[in-house]
Amino acid sequence: MTDTIYAPPVVPLPEGVQDLTGQVHFDYGRNIIGQGGMSDVIRGELNGYIVAVKIIRYIDPDQIAAYQRRADRELTVWRGLNHPNILRLIGVVNWNNYNTRPGLVSIIVPGKVLSYVRNRRLADKHAILIGMAHGLNYLHSQGVIHGDLKPPNVLVDECGIPKICDFGLSRILDSDEFITRTTHRGTIPYIAPEILRTVEESDKVNPLELNTLQSDMYAFGLTAGAVGVILVIPLFHAFLM
């Protein structure tokens, strides 16, 4: 594996977050294992173990500050979470002098939920749904609204344990510190109708402020339906028919 040229350690870090700069080795250009709308996930190595490194992808150079706020928000929310059904954050790395884009290091989980449950027994699907419910219940008990719950944001490990991931649109209830402005709403088929209506009526509304425990439950219901049914066509296309 090609070593990455590392920048100085990330400072300051939130309490409880480990600086793994120089300890995690990865090659951004050759080891991408996943891509989302705003980030890439790279396979890395830490002390002989395979890990995942998530890095916010720059789309618009003029929006660097916005990308930094998103990374900060995700790091701040994610660092305090500890539950079997939540993907665990291990630490962060600073790389190639991109001080505004720390890499978020987590355990690596091999599969996404829809791929895992396909052709599985009904009992296995029920276990997945129960695990997802436990994970979301834990988030809400910690005052965290996920904000973008959908099948791609639920991973399943080799033991069949689901783990909710991707806290880039999450926020902590009753804390203005984490409600930074964003134009990213989430994934349309999984957004509660009242949020879509409000955002469409006014471009001055911050979508993060509209997410609630109830909108998370709406997204959970649709995600659970996709897991239990495994639609033949993608859910988004079903909404258009």
Image (cartoon, rainbow, N blue to C red):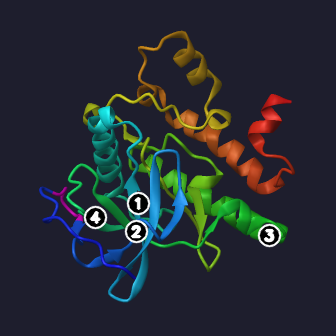
Q: Which of marks 3 and 1 is in front?
A: 1
Q: Could you tell me how far apart the alpha carbons at marks 4 and 2 are, in whole angstroms?
A: 9 Å
Magenta residues, as a range?
A: 13-17
Q: Mark 4 or mark 2: name the one nearer the start of the chain.
A: 4
Residue 24 in picture, x, y percent from top left:
30, 76
Q: Are marks 3 and 1 in contact (CB under 8 Å)?
A: no
For marks 2 and 1, give the CA distance.
8 Å
Tag count: 4
For residue 116, side relative to residue 61 (left or right): right
Q: What residue did someone put label 4 on?
A: 92
| 63 relative position to 8: left or right | right
Residue 119 vertical position relative to residue 76 in the rendered view, above or below: below
Q: Earlier in the sequence, mark 4 or mark 3?
A: 4
> Which residue is disc 2 drawn over?
106
Q: What element carries label 4?
A: strand
| Mark closer to the chain start, 3 or 1 | 1
Callouts 2 and 1 close, C-beta under 8 Å: yes
In front of the other: 106 or 79: 106
Judging by the rendered image, the residue that carries numbered circle 1 is: 54
Give neighbour class at mark 3: few <14, some 14-19, many 20+ (Cα, 10 Å).
few
- Which residue carries the number 3 mark? 123
**Rendered-image quadrant of the C terminus:** top right
Q: Residue at x 80, y 65 (%)?
A: 118
Q: In this view, does 200 lie above or below 141?
A: above
Amino acid found under the numbered disc labelled 1: Lys
How many residues crowd mark 4 within 10 Å: few (<14), some (14–19), many (20+)?
many
- Residue 9: image x %, image y %? 14, 65
Q: Is mark 2 on a helix, strand or loop?
A: strand
Q: Does the magenta stretch include residue 193?
A: no
Discs 4/3, front: 4
Q: Which residue lies furthest to the bottom in this view?
A: 48
